[in-house]
Amino acid sequence: MNDWKTLDTDELNGLLQDRQAIYERYRNRRLRLDMSRGKPCPEQLELSMGMLDAVGSAHSPKTADGTDTRNYGGLDGIPEAKELFAQMLEVQPDEVIVGGSSSLTMMHDAIARAMLQGVLGSAAPWGKLSAVKFLCPSPGYDRHFAICELFGIEMIVVEMKHDGPDMDAVEKLVGEDESIKGIWCVPKYSNPDGITYSDEVVDRLARMQAKAADFRIFWDNAYAVHHVTDHPDRLKPILEACKAAGNPDRVFLFSSTSKISFSGAGVAAMSASVANLNQIRKALSVQTIGPDKINQLRHVRFFGGMDGIKAHMDKHAAIMKPKFDTVLSLLETELGDKGIASWNKPNGGYFISLNTLDGCAKEVVAMAAEAGVTLTKAGATYPYGRDPRDRNIRIAPSYPTLSELGTAIEILCVCVQIAGAKKLLSGKQ
Ligand code: PMP
């Protein structure tokens, strides 16, 4: 089928009627399919069940240095867990704080602390300033944007390119405006584009001139080891790059095992320079006596080390790959060459990001919902829920079964075709 933009009104009307009839048939089936959030499916969760036996009544509750994980103590995590996250994030163990079960909580708390007390080197708490702004490479992760909204941090959209944020724009903005205090980054298999930042982008972020002396990069490496294909992307370690550029305190890194072990019951960590962590630990010691060390210990015992994590992630990939393949091949068959949609083909992560023609995403998501397919709200991938081109849709293929996924994507594609045909017809009036 040709590019639909080259079709005349009659041809487009014919296609529209045909697709509307297909849509009605789907609608009458009263399906219930949910692709709204990137949740692991039950088979993925089963992969980690052995962990629940790794710290049982028959096992020692002690860490290698003799710490009893059942008791208080150890503000920033057990040494074995620091070592594991240090390897995953490519930093040193003394540059890691291992926390509770959620990296999002650690990000939220890092911002809360910055607003209340400032970060290392702040002249004043951010909350005392007349304006605090963050750069938000978009499409991006809606929960990052929600944190900014909660704290009244103004969000500035920066375009995502094929290798990361538009660095010309980032450098210009950060270099000129002292009220820009941070940038959100999901640097590997980004949510939702599945993009991994290039070495050049990492280096430019590390060495750019920032007007705010206390500027921070919030480096949310949630998908550090989550490859789907057998040719994983490689991400340049940013803490090292920041040190090399003479800006060792510029970055806060975050990660968790939420999509490695159990979502909501994994282990989360943050990393930064030793100087940053010393400042953070002071506030942390008021907030908590220490994290859940038993959970940390069972993670370390179950995975053994990075080799164990890699082998485990191969098993996740074996479940995820057919799902990504199903989505990508249906998108190709139903939308390829029609000129009404475009999408990325990520090597990992949890999402496929679909762009419709401008002005169609809200309509597509609403139509899909009417036919029983729940997608992430249109606009959610942009600050304030406002996609300026109303075109981005986040597809989360992990949770549904393969057959549910196939049906859901067929319905989505019909909706994209209907909205696309209507849009093209409206342009001919
Ligand atoms: N960051 C990103 C980019 C995510 O997609 C998610 C959702 N899995 C999270 C953070 C949440 O992580 P956690 O469960 O550790 O809070």
Image (cartoon, helix red, strand yellow):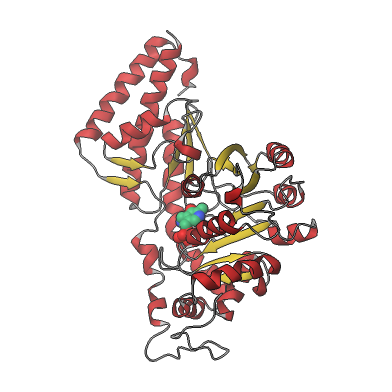
Query: Residue 80 location in percent, x, y?
Result: 57, 80
- Which residue appears at 43% of the width and 35% of the height? 333
Most foreground residue, 280 or 54: 280
User: Relative to 274, is 248 above or below?
Assistant: above
Most foreground residue, 315 or 255: 255
Query: Residue 211 location in percent, x, y?
Result: 74, 44
Horizontal arrangement in the rendering, residue 426 relative to residue 126 (left or right) = left
Q: Is residue 10 visible?
A: yes
Horizontal arrangement in the rendering, residue 333 relative to residue 73 (left or right) = left
- Which residue appears at 57% of the width and 53% of the height? 115
Total marks shown come to 0
User: Relative to 98, is 15 above or below?
Assistant: above
Query: Residue 404 location in percent, x, y?
Result: 31, 47
Horizontal arrangement in the rendering, residue 222 relative to residue 262 (left or right) = right
Q: In the image as oriented, which residue stretches furthest toward the top?
A: 429
Query: Residue 227 location in percent, x, y?
Result: 54, 57
Q: Is residue 237 visible?
A: no
Occupied quadrant, residue 253 = bottom right
Most foreground residue, 195 or 347: 195
- Which residue appears at 46% of the width and 42% of the height? 328
Q: Quadrant of the C terminus?
A: top left
Q: Quadrant of the N terminus?
A: top left
